[in-house]
Structure formats: C-alpha cells, structure tokens
Image (cartoon, grey):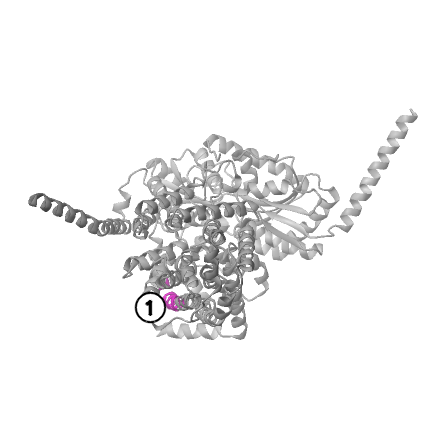
C-alpha cells in the first residue's frame, strides 16, 4: 500500500508543469539523437550537463533520463527504414525491420517497435518501483566468472542463429571475434592488430561496423542492381500492424522485456547484448525460423522491447546503490553529485521527490514517446517514397556525420567505407553479417572476463563451477549443447540404422 | 661600429614592434571562437572539468569556447591534434596526470616538454585506498600485514593498464613489498563495482569515484593518496601518514596551449582561469566531486609536469609496464 502512495507521490511530482516540460524536451532530444547514427545518449548528456546546473535537480534528472531511454526509441527508426542503425542496441532491428520495410511494411515495423518499447518501459517502471533494491543486490553477485559463463552461454546459443550454411555462419562468427580483438589488450595494454594506428588503439566502434556493413553495404548493393532500386519507391502497405502482427508480437514483446530487464540490472553488459539475446530466443522459439531475416515481425518486437527494458533497468543499480551500470549512468551519477545529492540507498528516503518523481516521469516519458512516435510513422514511411538519387546520398551524408561526431575523427569514416565494401563482398558471397556482429559484441567480453576471472583465482579454472551463479550458466550451456546436438545425433543414428538395414537387405 | 649600432637599433625596433603586436593581440584576443580540446571521450573527469572551464571562459572572454572531444589511446590522439595546431591562442588543451604518464608509455609524435606552453594547473583529485568491508583490516598497516600473511591472495582492482589507478597500485606495491595482484578492468567504474561486490578485495581508486560509497559504508577508506588529508575525509589519514612513507598519487588537471602561443595571450588566459578557480562555485564543484582546486601559474605548472613525468616514468620502468 505504501508503494502505491509512493507512486502517487511520484506522479504528483512528475506531473508538475515544469517537470512535464523537461521530460518532453528530454524524450524529444533522445528520439532525435537516437535517429542520428554514432552520436549516442552519453555524448549528448555530457554536452547538455552544464546547461542543467541552473535547473532544479529533479527536473534535470528527468530530462537526462528522458534523453537516455528516448534514444532507444529513436534508434529503431532508421534501422527499419534504411538499414541504418542509430544506436548500438538497434543493430539487430536492421535484420528483420529493414526487410519488412522493403516489403512495404515499414509502418507496421515502426509501430510494433514503439508499442514493444512502451510495454517494456511500463513493466520496468513497475519493476524499479517494487523490486529495485533486491534486484540491485542480486546484480552485485556477478563478477568476472559469472559474466564469462553467461557470455559463453550466449555465444553457444548463437549457433542457433546459424541457419542455412553452417560453415559460412561459423566463419563469420570468427571474423567478428577477430575484429573484436583489435585494440589494446585489457591485461597487458599491448595493442593488438592496430597496425600502428592510434585510432585503432581503443578498438573498432560497433556502430562504425554496423553502419558500414548494413547501411553503406545496402546502398552499394542497390546501386549494383537497378531492379532492386524500385523496391524502395513502390508499394507501401498498411501503416499499422494487423491483428495477426499483434498476435505474433505479443510473446516476443513479453520475453524481450524479461530478457532486457535481466541484462539491464547487470552492470557489466551492453544494451546490444540484450537485443541480440532476445533475437536469438525468438528465432529459436519461432515456429518457422527461416522467416527470420526475411521480415519476421517477431525479430523487431523482441529486440526493441529488450533494448528499452535494458536501458530503463540500468537505473536500478544507479538509483538504489549509486553504482553506475554503464558510462551514461556514471555521467548521471556525476550529475547527481554536482547537484549536491550523494547517490546511494539513502536517496530513496532523503530525496523521495527525486526518486519517485524520476520513476513516475519514466512512465510519463514512455507515454510521450508513444504519442510522439506513432503519428510520425506516416511521415517516416513517406520518406521511403523519395527517389533513390536523393535518398542514398542523404543516408551516406547522415551516416558520415554521425560517425564523425563520435571522436571528431575522419579515420572512422574511412573505416565505415571499408566496412561498406566488406558488406557488399559478404553479400555477394552470401555470408550473413549477423553472426559476425554477434561474435564482435560477445567475443571481447568472453575473453576479458575469462582472463580476469582466472587472474583473480590465480589460474584455477574451478571458479567457473564453484560459484553457484556461474555453475548455473555452465549447466545451461551444456544443456543447450545437448538439445542442439540431439536432432543431429538422432539423424546420424537414423542414417546409420537405415544404412545398416540396407546392408541387411543386400 | 656604425653597422653595429644600426643592427642594435633594428633589433630594438623589432622587439618593440613584436611587443606592440603581442599586446595588441592580447587586447583584442579573442576575436573568434576558441577551441578547447579534451583528449578523452565525453563523460570522464577530464570532460567534466573541461566543459566547466569552457563554459566559464566563454562568459569571461566574450567569445564562444567550444569543447572538442578527441578521445582515444589514453589521451594521445587529442594531445597530438593540439600539438599540431596553430599557436595563436585559439586552440587550448585540457590535460590530466595521463599526460605525464603517456610520455613513458607511448612513442609520442610530440615532445611533451617542448610542444606545449603551460597555462595553469586547475585542480587535484587524490586516490584512495578502499577495501571491501568484509576484508578484516582497518588500517593500511593491517592490509600490508594481511598481504604478507597470505601472499598472492589479495587483489587490487584497477582501471586499465597505464591508468593513474594502475600506477598508484604499482607504487604502493613497490614501496611496501606487499604481494597483491592487480586485476585490470575497462575503466574505473567496473573496477569499483567489483570491489563493492566483494569480488576483488581492494582498490587504489579515484576518491571522486569512491566518495559516495565510502560515505554509505559500502567500502572502507584506509588512506588517501594526497600529500595532505582530503578536506572531504578529514578523519582518514594519508597513505604516507598511515605507514607508507613517500606515497603520493594524485590525479590532476591543467590547461596547455601549443608552444609559441604569444605570451600576452597566455597571461590573459591565466588571469581569467585564475579568477574562475577562485570563485566559490568552482570550489564547490571540485569539492562535491572529492577533488580540490589547486591553482598553479604557468611558471609553476611547467616544472610540476616535469616532476610528475619523472616520478611515473620510474614506476612504469620498475613495474615493466608497456603499452606498445
């Protein structure tokens, strides 16, 4: 009962005219930067921070939070429309979202992304309000060993993605792992595969690769095939999802929210992991996995819910323990300190207006985002009717500006171009870039946490099975391997049985 | 003789003209937008300090001071960009202790002593020896004793190879001979989380970062790394006081300009920055973050950088740390 009173108090704070205004500004800015590739919520918040010094802390935090989760909404828009991921977490949305757009179903994809995000936002607001402290304590139990076992499970499960040509998929995973190695080694500081470029010392940016392979690659391949260009300009079907779409999306949205909330609470994961995991789960559970990659609405609904849930649940460790779960959260913590508020469990009791006001504002912000995004769908879809000679250069310019803005580095633009060329080469060879992205995202985390866990245990590998949470993931990994191998084994047995019978009849 | 007088006269004339031009430049400076390069991505302490200074300088100079984040390679990329810029006062650079550390870690394309003219040191943020509350020690001496009793079982969480946290830990090990492992994380945040979770036992981390968790009791502060006790933690001894003689590890921030920037412009910038640092608002901003305003003139700041470079160079050499 007290919780409801607290929530009502929170809404009374968040619904003040000033706070509503800052919430709106926040989600609007968030949506815009989400659409622009490269420049992310972290850079935006850093730039806007000095402007908020004269604003009351509650209003300032509401605005900064709005930018953060608003970016997750905006990130999907360009992924779906033109295969251009606006945010790291939206890379997965390109896969099926863009295919839907090509089939004239951009409106349905955009709408389901917004609806899924809204659902996830609502659930996570309630999660924060009711369970934040125990969830944060749970997250603290995760260290290197747990992260390693969790990521290993992810990498093994990634084999699920490998439909079609298994060899090609595995080869692409390896390409991703190799690309992930580039940069300074965490343990020794030695540069690996940087070829003397300082620009490669910190590794290659996920968005640089994704924009190159997906967006630039798509444009190059369109230009090489005059037939395909027409697809962009013709047939745009219904703007909103059909009843069938909604039915199909319901499960993925619920599961995506769960997956996103789980990863969101953990400080050591990135939003891309949540959306990739959700995609893998949907693909595994889907009745017809071959639909994925061909415009399956489940492939948009799940990951988009997951990245929004992840973004919002990243607030749990920050608000309850004062622990930053990501760079952006570290920045928000810094902001709190500048406003003279010491972050930690006492925020809930000392500054109830800030704590509950912020939580309530998140739900209000989600409503605003839905209202902001749904009417825009018509406008976005009309964008696709632009002739390609206008659209393609615009996308290229847009990509280049976004990538450049991250480090003010022209090197990154060249990298993007190189990955554009690689993207079209892979397309010609019929190699899907999705396993590559997965290897790239997960590989460095697997390596880093494996080595760190062994460093802490002084080389004793038993840490992975003696720590209970880690053990659970290891067991799950083994189970996944068995389940995956089972059909193949059965087939092999079947084939062996058949051939032996053949032998008998001969 | 006549010739000599003539050339002397010419020299005086040249000097006078140069002085006049310089003074005129300082009087009219700035006539256009000034760029402040922060050699780190948005979000870290350099960025917070840099953006604050940029905002305040904009007010005082009457021209926009724009922040240009050039992150990468521990600050080397942005510093290189600044070294290559015109020394006209329209490019400035924020530096931190990483500037002194990088000299010994990387093959630099610039000469860290000659490529820049110091303008001002801005502030100092000491490190802190923080331990997980479950570790049965209550002082620096007890921690060292525990490490001797159980060699190779304790670990320090560090923010990455060559970071100020890493070198602070190496310095601690070399002064005490304690057998404590150093576990590297990607940044100070993840390292701190691992200590709060009790997975790594201790860290020599940035006080700025640990402050709220020391106050809430999630970690115990055994000592601070400054020369004096921290104003924010007056009851916690310095690590040197607590028994590690000679230990001092501070992060610090300052402003440089490319070498050859006219003297009057440097003096003007120092005057404005000095006024900014004296304001209560600045002192509060630094204090809230666990840091302190630590003003140095251009004449003091130059030698300070040289001393810091030598100190960390020695630690890096002894610990055999390599980044390339």
Disc count in the image? Answer: 1
Position above or below: A249 against A416: below
Mark 1 Cα within 10 Å, few/some/many (few <14, many 20+)?
some
Of all residues, the one furthest to the top in this rendering is B1
Q: Nearer the viewer, residue B132 or B98?
A: B98
The magenta stretch is A119-132
Whether residue A71 is visible here, answered yes or no, is no
Q: Secondary structure at mark 1?
A: helix
Residue plotted at (50% across, 48% down):
A416
Is B174 within the magenta? no
Residue B5 in view (yes/no)? yes
Q: Residue lying at the far right in this picture: please name it.
A: B2
Q: Residue A178: image x %, image y %?
A: 40, 41
Residue B304: image location, x then y, percent: 61, 38
**In this figure, which residue is indicated by the disc labeled 1?**
A250
Q: Quadrant of the N terminus of chain A?
A: bottom left
Left or right, B73 with respect to A431, comes to right
Looking at the image, is A61 positioned above or below residue A410?
below
Which one is in front, A44 or B259?
Answer: A44
Q: Nearer the viewer, residue A449 or B164?
A: A449
| Chain containing the residue with disc 1 | A
Residue A124: say if magenta: yes
> Residue A319: horizontal and vertical position, in percent?
43, 61
Q: Position of residue A293 (x, y in %)?
A: 36, 57
């Amino acid at each position: 009962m007290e919780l409801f009173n607290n929530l009502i108090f929170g809404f009374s704070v968040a619904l003040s005219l000033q706070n509503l205004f800052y919430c709106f500004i926040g989600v609007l800015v968030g949506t815009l930067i989400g659409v622009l590739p490269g420049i992310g919520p972290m850079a935006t918040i850093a730039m806007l921070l000095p402007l908020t010094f004269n604003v009351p802390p509650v209003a300032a935090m509401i605005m900064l939070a709005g930018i953060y989760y608003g970016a997750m909404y905006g990130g999907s828009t360009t992924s779906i429309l033109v295969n251009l991921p606006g945010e790291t977490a939206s890379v997965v949305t390109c896969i099926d979202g863009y295919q839907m757009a090509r089939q004239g179903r951009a409106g349905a994809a955009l709408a389901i992304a917004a609806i899924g995000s809204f659902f996830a936002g609502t659930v996570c607001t309630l999660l924060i309000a009711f369970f934040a402290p125990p969830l944060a304590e749970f997250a603290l139990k995760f260290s290197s060993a747990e992260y390693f076992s969790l990521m290993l499970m992810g990498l093994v499960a990634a084999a699920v993605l490998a439909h079609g040509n298994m060899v090609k998929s595995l080869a692409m995973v390896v390409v991703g792992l190799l690309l992930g190695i580039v940069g300074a080694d965490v343990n020794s500081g030695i540069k690996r595969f940087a070829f003397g470029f300082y620009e490669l010392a910190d590794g290659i940016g996920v968005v640089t690769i994704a924009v190159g392979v997906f967006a630039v690659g798509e444009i190059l391949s369109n230009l090489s095939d005059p037939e395909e260009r027409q697809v962009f300009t013709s047939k745009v079907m219904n703007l909103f999802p059909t009843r069938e779409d909604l039915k199909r999306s319901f499960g993925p949205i619920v599961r995506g929210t769960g997956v996103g909330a789980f990863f969101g609470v953990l400080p050591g994961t990135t939003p891309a992991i949540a959306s990739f995991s959700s995609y893998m789960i949907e693909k595994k559970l889907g009745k017809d996995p071959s639909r994925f990659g061909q415009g399956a609405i489940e492939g948009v609904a799940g990951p988009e819910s997951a990245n929004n849930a992840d973004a919002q649940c990243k607030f749990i460790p920050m608000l309850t323990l004062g622990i930053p779960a990501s760079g952006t959260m570290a920045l928000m913590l810094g902001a709190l300190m500048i406003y003279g508020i010491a972050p930690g469990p006492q925020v809930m009791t000392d500054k109830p207006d800030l704590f509950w006001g912020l939580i309530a504002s998140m739900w209000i912000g989600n409503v605003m985002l839905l209202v902001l995004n749904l009417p825009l769908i018509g406008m976005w879809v009309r964008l696709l009717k632009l002739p390609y000679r206008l659209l393609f250069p615009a996308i290229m310019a847009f990509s280049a500006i976004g990538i450049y803005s991250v480090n003010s580095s022209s090197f990154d633009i060249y990298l993007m171009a190189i990955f554009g060329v690689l993207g079209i080469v892979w397309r010609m060879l019929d190699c899907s870039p999705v396993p590559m992205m997965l290897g790239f995202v997960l590989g460095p985390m697997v390596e880093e946490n494996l080595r760190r866990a062994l460093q802490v245990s002084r080389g004793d590998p038993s840490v992975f099975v003696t720590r209970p949470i880690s053990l659970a993931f290891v067991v799950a990994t083994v189970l996944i391997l068995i389940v995956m191998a089972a059909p193949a084994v059965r087939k092999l047995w079947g084939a062996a049985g058949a051939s032996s019978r053949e032998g008998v009849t001969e | 003789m006549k010739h000599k007088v003539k050339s002397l006269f010419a020299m005086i004339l040249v000097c006078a003209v140069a002085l006049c031009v310089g003074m005129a430049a300082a009087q009219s400076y700035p006539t256009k937008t000034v760029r402040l390069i922060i050699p780190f991505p948005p979000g870290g302490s350099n960025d917070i300090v840099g953006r604050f200074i940029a905002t305040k300088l904009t007010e005082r100079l009457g021209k926009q001071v724009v922040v240009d984040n050039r992150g990468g390679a521990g600050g080397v990329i942005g510093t290189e960009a600044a070294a290559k810029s015109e020394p006209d006062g329209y490019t400035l650079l924020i530096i931190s202790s990483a500037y002194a550390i990088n000299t010994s870690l990387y093959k630099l394309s610039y000469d860290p002593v000659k490529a820049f003219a110091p303008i001002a040191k801005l502030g100092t943020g000491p490190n802190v020896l923080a331990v997980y509350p479950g570790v049965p020690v209550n002082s620096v001496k007890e921690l060292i004793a525990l490490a001797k009793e159980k060699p190779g079982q304790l670990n320090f969480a560090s923010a990455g190879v060559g970071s100020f946290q890493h070198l602070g830990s190496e310095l601690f090990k070399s002064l005490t001979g304690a057998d404590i492992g150093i576990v590297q994380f990607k940044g100070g945040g993840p390292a701190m989380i691992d200590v709060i979770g009790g997975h790594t036992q201790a860290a020599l981390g940035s006080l700025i970062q640990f402050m709220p968790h020391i106050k809430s009791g999630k970690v115990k502060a055994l000592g601070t790394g400054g020369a004096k006790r921290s104003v924010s933690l007056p009851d916690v001894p310095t690590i040197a006081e607590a028994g590690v003689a000679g230990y001092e590890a501070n992060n610090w921030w300052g402003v440089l300009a490319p070498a050859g920037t006219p003297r009057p412009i440097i003096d003007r910038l120092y005057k404005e920055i000095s006024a900014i640092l004296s304001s209560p608002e600045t002192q509060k901003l630094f204090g809230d973050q666990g840091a302190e305003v630590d003003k140095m003139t251009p004449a003091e700041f130059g030698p300070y950088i040289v001393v810091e470079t030598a100190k960390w160079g020695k630690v890096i050499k002894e610990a055999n740390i390599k980044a390339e």
